[in-house]
Image (tube, helix red, strand yellow):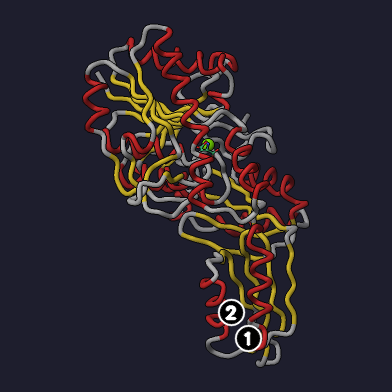
Amino acid sequence: MARIVQKFGGTSVGTLDRIRNVARKVEAEVKAGHEVAVVVSAMAGVTNQLVQNCTDLNRIHDPKEYDTVVAAGEQVTSGLLAIALQTIGIPARSWLGWQLPLRTDDTHGKARILGLDTGAVVERMAAGEVAVVAGFQGIDANGRITTLGRGGSDTSAVALAAALNADRCDIYTDVDGVYTTDPRIVAKARKLNRITYEEMLELASLGAKVLQTRSVEMAMKHRVPVQVLSSFAEETGSALPGTLLVDEDRNVEELLVSGIAYSRDEAKITLVGVADRPGVAAGILGPLAEAAINVDMIVQNVSADGRTTDLTFTVGKADLDRTCQVLDAARAGLGYQRLVADSNVVKVSVIGVGMRSHAGVAQRMFKALADRGINIQVISTSEIKISVLIAEEYTELALRALHTTYGLDQA
Ligand code: ASP
Ligand code: MG
């Protein structure tokens, strides 16, 4: 007997038929003699609609009420799945975030999990009842409902699996695993059987949308055996299992690059004619940090005349207007000549733990892009990833070229 956490995403619970299908997947684990807890997302599209409703009433709404509203989608699916399970003779009950409770801080809209009490759930699971937990939601110390950020039910599932010390955390989604890159863009993308926690963390934070970044952080920290797989496997005829998250020493695929991610959520800012003296970069980035604007890639050019230079960096597209505002307000103190904003950019990243021990990975990337006439605007690297900023129109071309360059194309 094992203890299993299953998580089903929005498309997997998108209709009543699909909820019945999910109930059968839960039934299979129960019939195999396992203790099962299930975490569900809201039905596909529901959370977006709820967010929209808040914004339509007031663009700048109370984040506490936002959380009360958007958490509702998961309340519905947890109850519906419990009914579907009971209907086929499987004892089940729903658990909302506050009922567990799953305790969070009070950062509404993006709350962090502080702790999760599983006592009551464990007792009832041992008695053969399936726990159907509403993902994405928790409760703060003030007794207010919180949510964990978009895509947060992945994190609910991993947190529950960690707290339950589960043998497996199966994340069911609408793709059958983690791919080398987005298969909608690169037809030759292939599914990875295994990927290291670290690589998955980079992939998720650099734009791959399979798992919420925080869920991977948590899985890595607690070494939760996470598996990403399709809830439509029978329909698509794909062979289980999906992709397993593993420690580096268990990763046998040994690819130099395991994945290529891209993000269209970045915008580029160039400050032209900034004084070239100590303290200037700090002077520019300080006000942005105070405004809670995250700066990602940064380059400072050498100054031709020794007096002024250009500073280029990227921020989230959603923060672009605010960034310009902040920099404009601080212009007198900073003394730059001109601000140039460009949101027609994409960040493309290649990721692989293999880079740690092999030279020339970056050079191959730059050459592949140069051969296709793609200009690199900004570069940033870490031990296991290289990111470049390029013009958005080259996204597809760059992804395909890099996929081939690193030998990832499916035969
Ligand atoms: N329903 C939430 C969202 O759409 C949480 C999730 O699906 O993971 O972001
Ligand atoms: Mg998701």
Q: Residues within 10 Å of mark 2 (few under 14, many from 20)?
A: many
Look at the numbered disc 1 and give the secondary structure of its residue.
helix
Residue 38 in picture, x, y percent from top left: 39, 26
Q: Is residue 64 above or below residue 388?
A: above
Q: Quadrant of the N terminus?
A: top left
Instruction: Out of 141 and 309, give the one closest to the viewer.
Output: 141
Instruction: Out of 6 and 328, give the one closest to the viewer.
Output: 328
Please indicate whether residue 225 sits to the left or right of residue 201 in the image: left
Residue 282 in picture, x, y percent from top left: 53, 81
Q: Is residue 177 above or below residue 366?
A: above
Looking at mark 1, is its residue's CB closer than 8 Å to ligand 1? no
Residue 104 in picture, x, y percent from top left: 36, 48
Please indicate whether residue 72 sits to the left or right of residue 30 in the image: right
Q: CA distance from mark 2 to mark 1?
A: 7 Å
Circle 1: residue type: Leu
> Contact (CB < 8 A) between labels 2 and 1?
yes
User: Residue 284, labelled with which disc?
Assistant: 2
Q: Residues within 10 Å of mark 1 (few under 14, many from 20)?
A: some
Give the residue displayed 68% in from the left and 78% down from the top: 328
Give the residue displayed 27% in from the left and 28% down from the top: 121
Q: Quadrant of residue 27?
A: top left
**Residue 256 visible in the picture:** no
Residue 357 in picture, x, y percent from top left: 43, 54
Q: Which residue is mark 1?
A: 334
**Residue 244 visible in the picture:** yes
Badge 2 or badge 1: first in the primary sequence: 2
Give the residue displayed 72% in from the left and 80% down from the top: 272
Give the residue displayed 24% in from the left and 27% down from the top: 122
Circle 2: residue type: Ile
Instruction: Out of 401 and 130, give the one closest to the viewer.
Output: 130
Q: Quadrant of residue 266?
A: bottom right
